[in-house]
Amino acid sequence: MKIDKQQIQEFNSQFLSEHESNFQFLTTQLDKRGLNVDKVVQKIADFQIAIPSWALGTGGTRFGRFPGGGEPATLEQKIEDVGLLHALNRSGGAISLHIPWDIPEDANAIRQLAFENDLIFDAVNSNTFQDQADQLQSYKFGSLCHTDQKVRQHAIDHNKEVIRHGVDLGSKSLTVWLSDGSNFPGQQNFKKALSRTLDSLSEIYASMPDDWKMFVEYKPFEPNFYSTVIPDWGTSHLLASKLGERAFCLVDLGHHLPNTNIEQIVATLMMEGKLGGFHFNDSKYSDDDLTVGSIKPYQLFLIFNELVDGMEDPQLNNPIPAWMIDASHNVKDPLEDLIQSIEAIKLAYAQALLVDRSKLEEARDKNDPVLTQEIFQDAFRTDLRPLLAESRKRAGAALNPIAFYRIYKIREQLIEERGVHSVATGL
Ligand code: PSV
Ligand code: MN
């Protein structure tokens, strides 16, 4: 199914007068602060977030899964879902594939379908955390770090194959997340495991086309519960630095132990020009799968404050990171959850754009923590939802994507087309 522009216009017309008075009220407030509202609206409209191909189905835990129906069973249907999302909010204009969960059989046809849905291919993700059917070398005790050269080579070759798929689709980056680690003290030689990982990554790095980047993702634990070979940003940075200038760190918000100061990590990595990728989600305890902004929206704002600071600093040469949502939707409709995620990300971004940076620096130089807090919280507590709606309106998207999704019964139509039985791959 497809959402056409006409439907969006019709839908928006019902909410237009209410939206215009809300936006007018906000504009008056922001004008008084000397903010260029049009510039912020444009920045919000330009900000695109990639959707992973594994996020379109209902997620689950090892205890169970409760699919809601109408889920995509093929790569084509996943692209169709991201296309629907993008038509609704004009902010999810890229898809990130996980190989081998989603292998494009006919790359040209898949590329064409993405083009018709106004989508491009973001980073491709390798998967050496599961054995595939008939796989001769097992990843039970690791992949790129494995003690056995044959297993390492198998994992290296898989990454090279992922790069080849990415090249065919027009991707420009590879994300490597390794589950490698150990479950018991003494099981693994830390130094040898890390050094073997570096050697394996070097071979993969050398096989990337010249205009490609590699993102090295870190995670403290899970699936291994004693040690992980790349557990933190320091190890990721060490590897990225040794690999070369096209290797970067990837920050996944859920991959930190509770209360870690993620915003400080972001600032440090950007200072070093090494922040390449970003995965959005939220967590309360130790998962990495809840909707971004659902639990800690202030932390998300603080993180965006550093991201904006890093992106606007002419002294830094950090590339614009590749943004992606990496969450699992256990009890929500995946498309509705993705709409909420994008809204939360853009809200935090807009709030961070509101911060008066010269005033902030002045207050910092004068060691005035009261004023710095006022500046932050003033931005955080301004309701910018009308500004986000305005950016959608100007981009030809729905003023209220969730309302559109429900009023036009998108899920019901998908269930009708695809059936209630779902065959989602992935998490
Ligand atoms: C691992 O937890 C991770 O964050 C990596 O990005 C994977 O590619 C993704 O989740 C899906 O398993
Ligand atoms: Mn991730």
Image: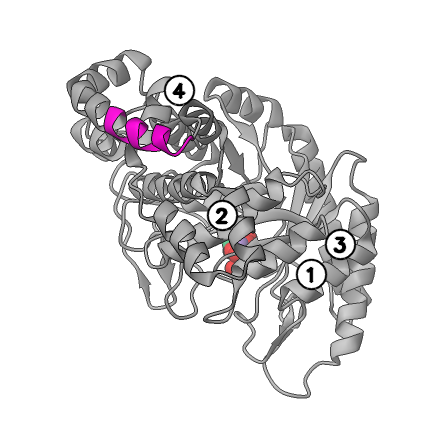
Is the N terminus in the top left, top right, bottom left or bottom right quadrant? top left
Is the C terminus in the top left, top right, bottom left or bottom right quadrant? bottom left
Q: Secondary structure at mark 3?
A: helix
Check residue 99 for magenta coloring. no
Task: Say which amino acid is labelled 1.
Answer: Ser
Give the spatial CA distance, label 4 vs label 1.
37 Å
Task: Say which amino acid is labelled 4.
Answer: Ala
**Residue at point 74%, 45% (across, down):** 160
Task: Say which amino acid is labelled 3.
Answer: Ile
Disc 1 target residue: 236
Disc 2 target residue: 304
In the foreground, 223 or 238: 238
Q: How many marks?
A: 4
Over which residues does the magenta segment extend? 24-34
In the foreground, 412 or 131: 412
N-term mark: 2 or 3:
3
Give residue 244's position: percent from left, percent from top: 82, 50
Mark 2 or mark 3: which is in front? 2
Give the spatial CA distance, label 2 vs label 3.
34 Å
Horizontally, is 34 left or right of 231 in the view?
A: left
Q: Secondary structure at mark 1?
A: helix
N-term mark: 4 or 2:
2
